[in-house]
Image (cartoon, grey):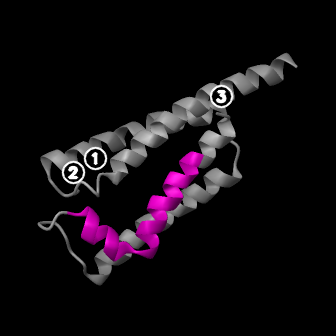
Amino acid sequence: MSARTAQFLIAAVFLILGGWALFAPGSVIALGVTEAYRDSTYLTRFTMACFGAQAVLFGLMALVTRWSARSFAVFAVLLLPFFGFNYWFHYEVPVLTSIGMLDFAGNVTMLVLAVLGWRAASREAAAEAAA
């Protein structure tokens, strides 16, 4: 896998999950949040849509920039706290349903892709330096 492919797949995670939150915030709340914490007020839907808009923005930026090995490494490290978030809000304070844990699946996918992208970008940079 090339670094660019890994980067595009990371963007796809943001665009798919972020797009869902942006364009169907009520659906994300209904499916992803446990009944005890579910709230479908306008402000809650608005906040979920804002969260989705930020994810879509990042996904679009990931499509139009070129990440170096360092970019992939920093992204991987910055993803780590999100695993704590997923654990806490699924097991300790049960806010996220099993469908809400798609966030966890997305984070795992992106972490694996970040490692693969880092390796590929390192190889690609070494090949360019040798040429």
The question of residue 22 being in magenta is answered with: yes
Q: Residue furthest right?
A: 131
Q: Which residue is mark 3?
A: 120
In which quadrant will I find the N terminus? top right
The image shows a total of numbered marks equal to 3
Q: Residue at x 37, y 73 (%)?
A: 25
Q: Which residue is mark 2?
A: 89
Crowd class of label 1 (few under 14; some 14 to 19; many from 20; radius 10 Å): many
- The dot on residue 53 is none
Seen in the image, is 10 located left or right of residue 41? Answer: right
For residue 7, above or below residue 102: above
Quarter of the image holding residue 47?
Answer: bottom left
Query: Does dot 1 land on a helix, a strand or a loop?
Result: helix
Seen in the image, is 87 located left or right of residue 72? Answer: left
Amino acid of disc 1: Asn
C-alpha span from label 2 to label 3? 34 Å
- The dot on residue 86 is 1
Seen in the image, is 117 located left or right of residue 108? Answer: right
The question of residue 121 being in magenta is answered with: no
Quarter of the image holding residue 60?
Answer: bottom right
Q: Which residues are magenta?
A: 9-33
Assess whether mark 2 and mark 1 are in contact (beta carbons under 8 angstroms).
Answer: yes
Assess whether mark 1 and mark 3 are in contact (beta carbons under 8 angstroms).
Answer: no
Q: Residue at x 30, y 83 (%)?
A: 42
Query: Does dot 3 land on a helix, a strand or a loop?
Result: helix
Amino acid of disc 3: Ala
Residue 112 in view of the camera: yes
